[in-house]
Image (cartoon, helix red, strand yellow):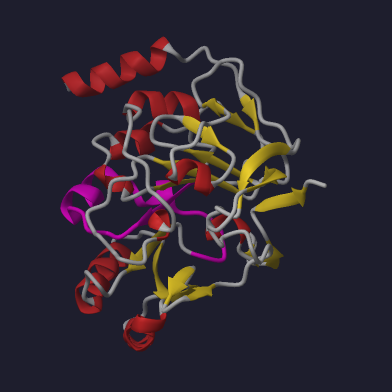
Amino acid sequence: MAEEAKLNFRAIETANLPDIALPGDYNYIAAFLTLDCNLGCSYCINRFGTLASPGRMLSGAEWITGLNRLAGTPDLPITLQGGEPTLHPDFAAIISGLRSDRHIDILTNLETDLDRFTAEIDPARVKRDAPYASIRVSYHPESMRIEQLAAKVLRLLDSGYSVGIWGVMHPFWKEEIERARDYCIESGIDFRLKDFLGHHEGAMHGVLSYADACDRLTASEVSCRTTELIIGPDGGLYRCHADLYEGREPVGTILDPAFSLTRDFRPCSNYGFCNPCDVKLKTNRFQEFGHTSVEIIRNG
């Protein structure tokens, strides 16, 4: 109770911050509660470049206050992710404290205490009308067994949660991912495939809208704008995933009363050291193919 009281007090203390209006064409809200993870997959997209050392982490009350400022685009969910978001000590409190009119999605490896998860998180709070599950579980065969993961997912499904599994089609793990998909489909679990993004045996994998954006050879100057709100563990607001993962300077913070979002292009001197998540050709949140998160204009 003492911890709950502290969370509530701190949320009330900063509750007078003005709203942050979301542009109507924004496609994604990513709340990186932490970049820590309880797995160590060799192909982790967070480590495509250099993953910066973790800094300060917002408290649950600060996350609640910051995320509750977001206004507009009511059908756009806040996606809690990481790292592994359930590692944040206030994970359940954050979900409970977010405004009821804002949908919540979760990206997780489900390597967490399911008894505690089901006791603290209402299935109705992470469920919405969408073409994919609100709780999206990643299967990583380097560290997991699909039979054990499927049992966890079936338990959540039986408890009323909207949950499915996603597997990355890494060339080395392709056969195992396909076996896992078949196993899950036979078990009544929604299992979907994701393209592998990254280098394997000297080749870059993934369909990129800007072919040389991830070469990591020479940095050049461009102008960029994003359709995603990327919030780091410290509350920093970042132009792209690469800026977050590599510890570059944010453009603002979620708790800055003067911050506002813009669709203006911003200068960048790191083109060539992009993260594939930002420049991949993919589907948008409506599952329509042809979307790229970051639009880039080459200078000169």
Q: Nearer the viewer, residue 46 or 248?
A: 248
In the image, residue 184 sits, relative to residue 265, either above or below, namely below
- Residue 45 sits in quarter: bottom left
Q: x and y percent of residue 248 in the render?
A: 49, 36
The quadrant of the image that shows the N terminus is top left
Looking at the rendering, the stretch of residues picked out in magenta corresponds to: 104-132
Q: x and y percent of residue 229 in the render?
A: 57, 40
Q: x and y percent of residue 189 in the render?
A: 37, 76
> Is 57 left, or right, of 243 in this rendering?
left
Q: x and y percent of residue 166 in the render?
A: 41, 70
> Which residue corresponds to the image point at 29% horizontal and 62% vertical from the top-left?
156
> Is 153 left, or right, of 168 in this rendering?
left
> Which residue corresponds to the image point at 33% horizontal and 46% vertical from the top-left?
85
Q: Nearer the viewer, residue 46 or 49?
A: 49
In the image, residue 201 sits, relative to residue 3, either above or below, namely below
Answer whether residue 150 is visible to the viewer in this image. yes
- Residue 277 sits in quarter: bottom right
Magenta run includes residue 107: yes
